[in-house]
Every structure is written in structure tokens, then in C-alpha cells.
Image (cartoon, helix red, strand yellow):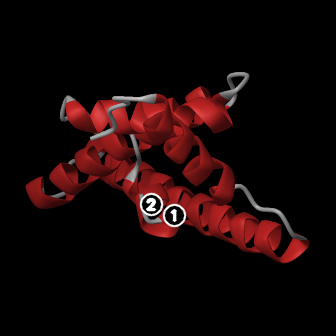
């Protein structure tokens, strides 16, 4: 839970966010590789969902497969929402605060694949 009781709390939080921004080419390469892994994971999930739904449309999918596909589809929607928030101006600075506030209200904004790669 992020609460700013005084200016020092805000400063410490801002410093933490600033330190997370890549500063060297190696740091940037690591971040880009993590992003690539997220994209690969989400692409695989999307392919699996589409294949399962295609099977279901023919009546060949089991209830477990459909249930799994529905959960993956919900995660894909969360990923799309998260990605759309990242394109907003200033999102790199606002996103950590938004995610922390969402956690306070028990709202899960971060997709599983992103959380796993970036330890969120």
C-alpha cells in the first residue's frame, strides 16, 4: 500500500520508480528481452484460445478446455487494457502509482505474464 504521509514518502517512492528505469544499453536490452518474452507468452495464449474456441464451435472441445480458454481470454483482455494504459502520456511515471492504488482496492490490473517477468 502506497501512502504519502509526508514529502519524504513521495520522494522515496519517486526515487524507487526512477531507479527502475533502464539507464544503460545492457539494462535496456534486459527490459526489451522481458517484453519479448511477454509478447511470446501472450501470443501463445491467444493462439491456444482461438484453437480451443474453434474446437468448441465444432462441438469437439471439453468443458475443461473451454473453461481454460475462457480464463486465458480474460487474461488477454487484461493484457490489452494494461497495454492501452501504457500508451498514455506519462504512463511510465504514473503506472506504478496506479498499480499500487489498484492493489489497495483489490483490483488486479497487471497481467500474469507481465507480473512474472517484471516481479510486480
Q: How busy is the neighbourhood of tag 2: few (under 14 within 10 Å), some, or many (20 plus)?
A: some
**Mark carried by residue 113:** 2
Report the residue at 58% width, 36% height from top: 83
Estimate the x, y position of residue 54 in percent, counting from the top left.
38, 48
Q: Secondary structure at mark 2?
A: helix
47 to the left or right of 111:
right
Estimate the x, y position of residue 84 in percent, counting from the top left.
59, 28
**Mark carried by residue 99:** none
Mark 2 or 1: in front is 1
- State the residue in front, 73 or 60: 73
- State the residue in front, 84 or 72: 84
Quarter of the picture holding the C terminus: bottom left
Q: Secondary structure at mark 1?
A: helix
Report the residue at 51% width, 56% height from top: 42
Q: Report the Cα–Cα distance between label 2 and label 1.
A: 9 Å
115 to the left or right of 18:
left
109 to the left or right of 68:
right
Report the residue at 61% width, 69% height from top: 37
State yes or no: discs 2 and 1 in contact (Cβ < 8 Å). no
Q: Earlier in the sequence, mark 2 or mark 1?
A: 2
- State the residue in front, 13 or 37: 13
**Mark carried by residue 118:** 1
Estimate the x, y position of residue 68 in percent, counting from the top left.
22, 56
Give the residue at the far right of this rendering.
25
Number of numbered tags placed on the structure image:
2
Within the image, what quadrant is residue 64 found in? bottom left
Give the residue at the far top of this rendering.
89
Quarter of the picture holding the N terminus: top left
- State the residue in front, 118 or 55: 118
Amino acid at each position: 500500500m502506497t501512502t504519502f504521509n509526508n514529502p519524504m514518502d513521495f520522494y522515496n517512492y519517486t526515487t524507487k520508480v526512477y531507479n527502475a528505469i533502464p539507464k544503460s544499453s545492457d539494462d535496456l536490452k534486459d527490459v526489451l528481452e522481458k517484453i519479448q518474452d511477454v509478447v511470446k507468452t501472450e501470443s501463445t495464449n491467444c493462439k491456444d484460445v482461438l484453437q480451443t474456441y474453434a474446437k468448441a464451435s465444432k462441438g469437439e472441445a471439453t468443458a475443461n478446455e473451454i473453461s481454460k480458454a475462457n480464463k486465458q481470454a480474460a487474461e488477454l483482455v487484461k493484457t490489452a487494457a494494461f497495454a492501452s494504459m501504457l500508451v498514455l502520456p506519462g504512463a511510465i511515471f504514473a503506472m506504478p502509482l496506479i498499480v499500487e492504488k489498484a492493489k489497495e482496492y483489490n483490483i488486479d490490473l497487471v497481467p500474469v505474464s507481465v507480473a512474472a517477468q517484471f516481479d510486480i
